Image: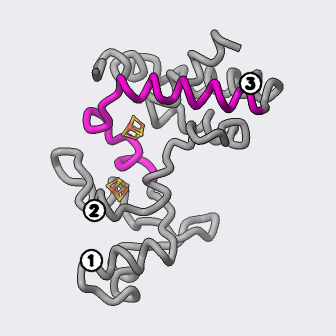
Amino acid sequence: MADPDLINTWQRKKEQAAAESKTIAKRLQRKKGKRLDELADEVHQEVFSRINCLDCAGCCSGIPPIVTKGDVTRIAKTFGMKPADFEKQYLTEDEDGDTVMNTTPCPFLLADRKCMIYDIRPRACRQFPHTDGLDFSKNMKLHALNATICPGVYHILQRLEALV
Ligand code: SF4
Ligand code: SF4
């Protein structure tokens, strides 16, 4: 069951979340390995069972997702658009040379915080925030950054800090 306090706590501590999460991520980095990845996956399931993403939409509002060629083909087809027209209308290249959505908030984020293309959304949206699936320790710097955008990541780092 969703617990709004998780999002509220993170919002109150947002100012310090960046420095705090960076320190925790550095400590966890020293303990990286299979055990940490398994534990992170368990903690991810627990934290996200208590967060309703529709109360947040921080990722959709704050980080333009990477959109792959496969994503473009799938989404453009659903809209009955040519991939090139979809790219022109919705995509841009970021400073790292990645193809991303061209606005933040995302052009497909609706007023009620739902995703207009949820069932066919980009792979990057499905994978965010990369804290499950046993790849946790490969993305430690990313977790520190994402903790400033995603309350889920913030709480996962906090819990792991207490557990390992
Ligand atoms: S495509 Fe959907 S899930 Fe992805 S950022 Fe946009 S609104 Fe969010
Ligand atoms: S930022 Fe995290 S908690 Fe918020 S909507 Fe995205 S995944 Fe869910």
Query: The residue under label 2 is which amino acid type?
Result: Ile
Disc 1 is placed on an element classified as helix
- Residue receiving disc 3: 28
Counting from the top left corner in percent of width and height, residue 163 is at: 65, 11
Query: The residue under label 3 is which amino acid type?
Result: Leu
Residue 74 is one of the magenta-drawn residues: no
- Graded by Cα atoms within 10 Å as few (under 14), some (14 to 19) or many (20 or more), the crowding at tag 2 reads some
Query: The residue under label 1 is which amino acid type?
Result: Thr
Image check: 73 left or right of 31? left
Disc 3 is placed on an element classified as helix
Looking at the image, which residue is at 42% across and 76% down? 72
Looking at the image, which residue is at 33% across and 19% down? 8
Counting from the top left corner in percent of width and height, residue 130 is at: 56, 43
Q: Quadrant of residue 142?
A: top right
Going from the N terminus, do you reach mark 2 or mark 3 first? Answer: 3
- Residue receiving disc 1: 78
- Graded by Cα atoms within 10 Å as few (under 14), some (14 to 19) or many (20 or more), the crowding at tag 1 reads few
Going from the N terminus, do you reach mark 2 or mark 1 first? Answer: 1
Disc 2 is placed on an element classified as loop
Range of magenta residues: 34-63
Residue 52 is one of the magenta-drawn residues: yes
Counting from the top left corner in percent of width and height, residue 12 is at: 40, 17
Q: Which mark is residue 131?
A: none
Image check: 125 left or right of 112? right
- Residue receiving disc 2: 117
Beta carbon of the mark 2 residue lies under 8 A of ligand 1: yes
Picture quarter with ligand 1? bottom left
Going from the N terminus, do you reach mark 1 or mark 3 first? Answer: 3
- Magenta residues, dominant SS class: helix
- The answer for how far apart the CA atoms under marks 2 and 1 are is 9 Å
